[in-house]
Image (cartoon, coloured by chain):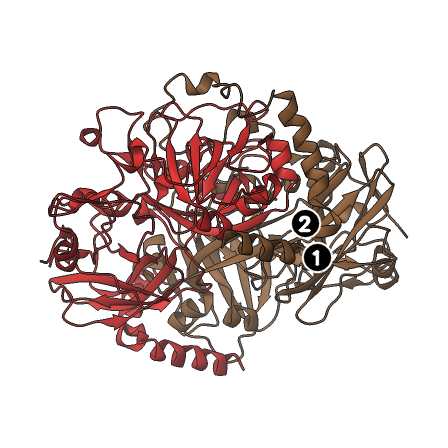
Chain colours: A brown, B red
Amino acid sequence: MHKAKTGARRREFLGRGFAAAGIGIMAAHHAKIAAANGGLDGAPLEVPDWTRMLGSGVTASPYGVPSEYEKNVIRRNVPWLTVSEQASVSFTPLHELDGIITPSGLCFERHHGGVPTIDPEQHRLVIHGMVREPLIFTMADLVRFPSVSRIHFIECPANGGMEWKGAQMAGVQFSHGMVHCCEWTGVRLSTLLDEAGIQAGAKWILAEGADAAAMTRSIPIEKALDDIIVAYAQNGERIRPEQGYPLRLVVPGWEGNVQVKWLRRLKLGDKPWQHREETSKYTDLMPDGTARQFTFVQEANSVITAPCPEKPLKAKGFHEIRGIAWSGRGRITRVDVSFDGGANWQTAALQEPVLDKCLTRFRLPWRWQGEQAFLQSRAIDETGYVQPTIAGLRKMRGVNSVYHKNAVHTWRVNPNGSIDNVQIL
Amino acid sequence: MHKAKTGARRREFLGRGFAAAGIGIMAAHHAKIAAANGGLDGAPLEVPDWTRMLGSGVTASPYGVPSEYEKNVIRRNVPWLTVSEQASVSFTPLHELDGIITPSGLCFERHHGGVPTIDPEQHRLVIHGMVREPLIFTMADLVRFPSVSRIHFIECPANGGMEWKGAQMAGVQFSHGMVHCCEWTGVRLSTLLDEAGIQAGAKWILAEGADAAAMTRSIPIEKALDDIIVAYAQNGERIRPEQGYPLRLVVPGWEGNVQVKWLRRLKLGDKPWQHREETSKYTDLMPDGTARQFTFVQEANSVITAPCPEKPLKAKGFHEIRGIAWSGRGRITRVDVSFDGGANWQTAALQEPVLDKCLTRFRLPWRWQGEQAFLQSRAIDETGYVQPTIAGLRKMRGVNSVYHKNAVHTWRVNPNGSIDNVQIL
C-alpha cells in the first residue's frame, strides 16, 4: 500500500517538474557520505557527546532563545545609511528564514526617534476631532473589545530604495529586508469609531505615535472602516517594543510608515493634515519635479531568498529555488521564475495557505550544472497586477524616487556558485 | 459612504449576536473616563515622559526581546510534578496569548533527559533498516531537499492528565498549557524514504532522538508516507533548542511524544519495537488493567483562555469569550460555548484561516451582569467527532489514565469576577 503512495508522490514530483532534478543526483551524493562512514549496518552508530550527558532543565529558560549556533541570525543595520541610530533602520535576515512567519525578534525596525519604553498601565489612546463623543482608552479598555487576528506583511516603502539609481546592496538582507510578516491581534478601528461616533463630513484620520518623533500620518477614513486594526498582539504575545509596544496601527497592505507604532492619538477631520512625514518624506519625486503624495499601497513584489548572495551554491545538482512574494492589493495568484534574466519563465509552486496581504512562499526545483545564470522572480496578484521590471519602473517614475521600488530583482549565479546582486536594464 | 459601511458592520455585529452586548455598555464606561480627563478638546493632551526623550537605537537589540513590562509572560513548571528538571515539563501561558501562533520562546517543553546542546555541523540523520540503501544526512543535505511549510499544533498526550482523577490545576497555563502551534518547515519524510528506497514488508519506522534519554518511538509507515515532516525550522527561524534543534519530527495531529526531537535515526522494520516509551509509558491504563497502546491521535479539544482563573473579570458588562480549539483528525468545524455548565450552547465565531491540525481561535460576545456562571467550550471537527464530557470520557476509559484527556472543561465565574477551575460530573 505504501508503495502505491510512494508512486503517487513521485508522480506528483513529476507533475511539479521535480523529475528533471532527479533522485539520482542526490542519491549519488549520499552514497558517497554513507561509504565514508563505513556502511551503516556494520559498526554501531557513533554516539555523540551530547547524548552522553543530561541536558538543561525546564527552568533554564522561562522565555526561550535561539541556539548559540544561530548567533549570526540577527537584524543588521547599514552604518552609513543614517546619521543616527534612533532615526534609522535594521533589516530582516530574509536569507536565514523559511515559511511565511517572521520571528518577532528578527522583524526589521524603522524608527524616527528611537524605541520608547512605554508603561502599558500609563499608556492611553485618544479618539477625538469630528466624532460624536471624544474618548480615551486604557489598554484594558481596548483588550475588552471584540478582537480580530490576521496574518499580514508590513513593508517599509523605502525597501530597496537604495537601488533606485543602480546602487547594489550586498545581499537580500539589505536589498529586501525591510519587510516582515506576523499574526496581528487587536480591535478593528471601525469598532472604536462606532464607539466614538463619526461626524458627517469626516474623511481623514490623523494617527500619532507616542515616540520622540511623534510620528504622524493622515489616513483616508474608508481604509479605517475597511480593515485597519488597532493591534496589541504580535505572533501571539504582546507587541514587541520596536514594533510599537503596547499599541500600533496595522494598515493591511499599506506602507509601513502609516502603520503608526506606539499609537496614542486618532483625530478625525475633513482633509489630510499635510504633516512633514507626508510632504517632505514618504512622497515620490517624479522626473518633472512634482511629487506623488499619499501613495499608500505596497504593490506586488517578490525576491528569491535561496540562493542569494549570503547563501551561495556549494554543489552542483539539485537545488530548490525559494522565495517570498507579497501584494498590498490582496492575494498572490502566481509567481514566475526565470533562470536567464527574464527571457524565459517557469511558474513556481505556492505554499498554502495563500492569504490576503500576506507573505507567500514560492518554490521551484532546479538542477544546476555550474553554468552562469540570472535568477529572477515575478509576482502577480489577484488584481492582475504584474511586478514590473526595473526599466519599466524607471520609465514610469524616473530615478529620483526612494519609495515603492518593487521591480523584478536579479541574482547572477557565477560558475563557482557565488551569487551577485546585479541589475538588468 | 463610510456611514453605509459602518451600518453594514453594525449589522454584521447583530448577525453575530453582538447587539446583546450593546455599544451602550462600553460607551458609558468610556464617557466616565473622558470626563475624568476634563474633556478632550479643551486642554491639550498630556505628553508622556517617553515622548520627551530619544528612545533606543537600531543596534540595541540585534535579536529582539519582549518589553520589560511583560516579564511575567513566561513558561512555568510545577515543582512537585517531577523529581528532576531534566525529565520534566514547562507550560505555555495560554492566558497571555492571542491568535493561533505560539511565540517560540513560550512553547511548552517536555523532556526526558534535558535539552542537549547540539552542534548542527556535527549532527547527522541516519536512515537504515529495511531500505534499499542506508543513508546518512548532514543538515546541509536535508536543507537542499524540496521543502514544505505547515502550521500545526503539537500537544503532549499528558496535557490535562493531572485532572483525570479530579485534581484541579490552578489555571489554564497548567490545565491545558502542554500545547503550542507553530509554522514548521522541513523535508517530507516520504521524500527521504524515496531517496533511501523502502523494502517490501517495511511497516513501521523507529525514530530516535540524540538527547540523553535517546527518546525512541515506533511509527506506522503509512503516516510517514502521508504528512510527517523532518523539520529544521519553527516560526521562520531554525528550531529552538528545547523544541529539537537542529532537527525534529513533526507528526501532524499525533501525540507530541512521537514527534521526536533532536532526531538522529530512522530505522524501517516490519513491526513496532515495543520500546519503554510505548509500553510502560504513553499507553492508557483501562479499568480492566489492560492498556490501550499506540493511541497516536490527539482528538478534538478546546479551552476558554479569556476569562480564566489567571484572567478574572474586573468589570460587569461586555466581555468577549476567547479560546482555542484543535483536532488531530483535521479541521475544526464548530465550537459551542455554554454559560450554564452545558445545559445550553451558543455557536462561537471561528477566526479564519481554519487550518488542518492547527489551533483555531474562537470568540463569542458576552454580557456579564455579576451572576455566577459555568463557562464551557465544546469543539467539533470535520470528521464529526464531538469533544466529550469528563463523565463521558471516564465512562469510556476509567480514571487510571494519564493520557488523552480532552474533556469539556469548566470555569466557574464567581459574582466577584474571580474564576475557579471546577469539574461538573
Say what secondary structure mark 1 lies in.
loop
Q: Is residue A64 left or right of residue A42?
A: left
Q: Is B364 placed above or below A44 here?
A: below
Residue visible at 14% across and 61% down in the picture: B374
Find residue A152 and report its horizontal and vertical position in percent.
Answer: 55, 57
Is A93 situated above or below B96?
Answer: above
Q: Is residue A152 found left or right of A400 in the rendered image?
A: left
Residue occupying image coordinates x 28% and y 57%: B302
Say which quarter of the image contains residue A5. Answer: bottom right
> Which image quarter is the C terminus of chain B in?
bottom left
Where, quadrant-wise, is the N terminus of chain B in this rendering? bottom right
Quickly name the residue at label 2: A323
Identified at 48% across, 52% down, the residue is B151
Does the rendering let one see residue A107?
A: no
Choose between B358 and A405: the one closer to the eye: B358
The residue nearer to you, when weighing B44 against B88, is B88
Circles 2 and 1, Cβ within 8 Å, touching? The answer is yes
Q: At 43% from the left edge and 50% from the top edge, which residue is drawn?
A: B252
* Neighbourhood count class around disc 2 (C-alpha, 10 Å): few under 14, some 14–19, many 20 upward: many
Helix, strand or loop for disc 2: strand
Query: On residue A348, which mark appears?
Result: 1
Q: Nearer the viewer, residue B323 or B80?
A: B80
Q: Residue furthest front?
A: B200
> In the displayed image of the protein, which residue is found farthest to the right?
A425
x and y percentages locating residue A220 in the rendered image: 59, 69
